[in-house]
Image (tube, helix red, strand yellow):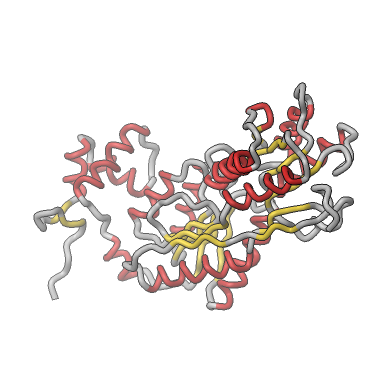
Amino acid sequence: MRRKPAGGTGDNGAVVKMSDVARQARVSVTTVSHVLNETRFVAPETREAVLNAIRETGYVPNTIARSLVRSKTDTIGLALSAISNPYFGELAHHLQTEAELRRYSVLIADTHDDPERELKVARDLHERRVDGIILAPSPAPGPTLDYLRLRQVPVVIVDRMIGSGLDEVGTENIEATSQLVEHLAGLGHQRIGMVTGLAGLATSEERVKGYRLGLERSNLKYDDALLRGGASDAEPARGATAQLLQTPKPPTALIVANNQMTIGAMRALRDAGLSVPTDIALAAFDDFDWADLFSPRLTTIAQPHRELAAHAVELITSRIAHPDEPPRSHRLEPTLIHRNSCGCQS
């Protein structure tokens, strides 16, 4: 049997070599190798030139030879941001449970929503020979996705759907957030504030769109002064909530865009001596086990953790087994949980 040469083939069927990429990018073969293997720092503009040359020439790294000596490990890498976040902690638990049902082990790594750390995590998981990676992408996941695509690592995007052309599964965010706004408006609130998530995240952008959609549907005017960024974490959300309360016309109701930020928002309300829902109504995206233990109990949007995990693991195991199948995308419906913090009787 004739052995396939290293590299890919161009439109005319000719073999594309690393030297062709180097010539196209006007760099050395060594530089191309460093970009492919992340073995040395390469200036961003040079790196981009190499990646563009790879796309233009159709070059594919010689993963065939590596795969001949690389046995299946029955291991899935899980790269999530802020595993300390109750939402991601619970999601990771269900992902691990689902993977074990299919006889896969799981390696979990925290990206901290930092693109550079995310790339390092992806590289480390790949070097540990995981069969595939489930990734909750950072605000700028381009280098990580390039790294994984070039090495033909099976990937599933979870939670933050970015239209990457990869398998994806996440929760519907726009209509769900709009539902929270409409509910609060229906209770008579006309100044509804929002503490938003980390800028650049798909979920943050979608929930802001849902907030604005809910205002429009409720015939309420959008006001920049009622929107503050909480960076998807408790302490920034505490500061953002304090800022909202200090505006000349503060909100009478508040939506917080994830459960980690809800902790910070509640601390800010406590610091201000405000009572929920008597002084201000409160609702949040993400439910958690202790949401009904507060007084008042929290009104939330509950995401389907188990279903998300089941879909993600089914997608990654299918992608591992059938790498050439078309990508699939799933949007799952969350649930509005009515409790007391919005001013309703549960």
217 or 132, nearer to the observer = 217
Residue drawn 59% across the image and 49% down it: 81
Q: Decide if residue 159 is on the left or right side of residue 261.
A: left
Q: Decide if residue 212 is on the left or right side of residue 67.
A: right
Look at the image and tell me whether residue 339 can be seen.
Answer: yes
343 or 96, nearer to the observer = 343
Image-quadrant location for residue 87: bottom right
331 or 44, nearer to the observer = 331
Q: Is residue 248 above or below residue 135?
A: above
Q: Is residue 233 above or below residue 129?
A: above
Q: Is residue 298 above or below residue 153?
A: above
Q: Decide if residue 89 is on the left or right side of residue 172.
A: right
Can you name the residue that lies furthest to the top here? Answer: 248
133 or 42, nearer to the observer = 133
Look at the image and tell me whether residue 231 can be seen.
Answer: no
Residue drawn 43% across the image and 61% down it: 167
Q: Position of residue 115 (x, y in %)?
A: 50, 42
Image-quadrant location for residue 244: top right
Image-quadrant location for residue 25: top left
Q: Position of residue 318 (x, y in %)?
A: 43, 72
